[in-house]
Amino acid sequence: MTRLLASVANLDELALAAQGGADILDLKDPRSGALGAWALDDIARAVDMTRSCPVHPPQNLPLSATVGDLPMEPAAVADRVARTWACGVDYVKIGLVPSGDPAGCLAALAPDARRGARIVAVLFADFWDNANQPLPDIARAGFAGAMLDTAGKGSGGLLRHKDIGQLARFVEQARALNLLTGLAGSLAVGDIPALLPLGPDYLGFRTALCAGADRGGALDPAALAAVRSAVPTHAG
């Protein structure tokens, strides 16, 4: 069943998203880029908050955290991923772009992935075409999952960059490689009926959860409720 991932910008939004029924809480600063990162101290506080005083069943909702829009420099990427993972989150999300050395970054992250760090590669639909998406390399590096997102939030949502057939092939290939699968990128409530039949493990939202579809604005409980009602509740 497809889960609802809610990207939250601060601890207040974290509590609101949990109370509003999000299945996965994604720590991301939308004002700092496509994968803007929280400060490490704040990530640690979020982990403490959700582990010591859960605010919504089920207990211990999974936390993911982004590491920022990093250039593909293996040493810097590996360092930031390791420090984010050490905060105690369940998943660390790293954006992969074709420029720089994405292959070197995968190689640098592979040892941590094999030691148990659950790393999710984010591929941007506006940078990668289906022919050159490095899903096999991501799987060989031991990553936990792969998601398709958009980098340029002003250039339209995911369905502007990929059609349903391309998204279906992405999900199918990632699933065949035993990777968790996610779709995101300025998704709207109206996109959900077309995406659910593809069977991704999660759909990620930020813009649709904010008043006026302003991803840099505050999370709006009513907007979250509309998305939650469109994504069947995950049980178990």
Image (cartoon, rainbow, N blue to C red):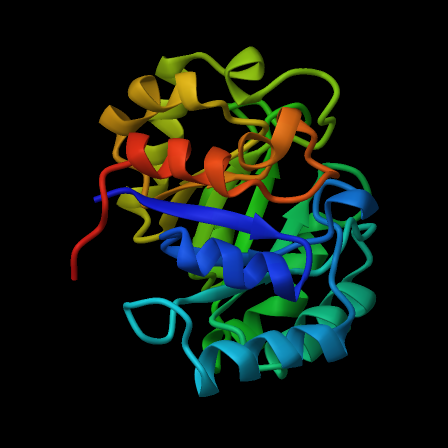
Tell me residue 3's x, y (percent): 32, 47
Tell me residue 7's x, y (percent): 57, 49
Where is 182 relative to 120, above or below? above
* Quarter of the image where one finds residue 78: bottom right
Residue 181 appears anywhere in the view: yes
Residue ranking furthest to the front:
222
Tell me residue 107's x, y (percent): 63, 63
Q: At 83% across and 50% down in the image, what residue appears?
A: 71
Residue 116 appears anywhere in the view: no
Residue ranking furthest to the left:
236
- In this image, 100 relative to 163: left or right? right
State the residue in front, 22 or 116: 22
- In this image, 89 relative to 84: left or right? left
Residue ranking furthest to the bottom:
52
Q: At 55% across and 56% down in the image, what residue appears?
A: 26
Tell me residue 189's x, y (percent): 43, 23
Q: At 56% across and 69% down in the image, what residue appears?
A: 110
State the residue in front, 91 or 30: 30
* Quarter of the image where one finds residue 211: top right
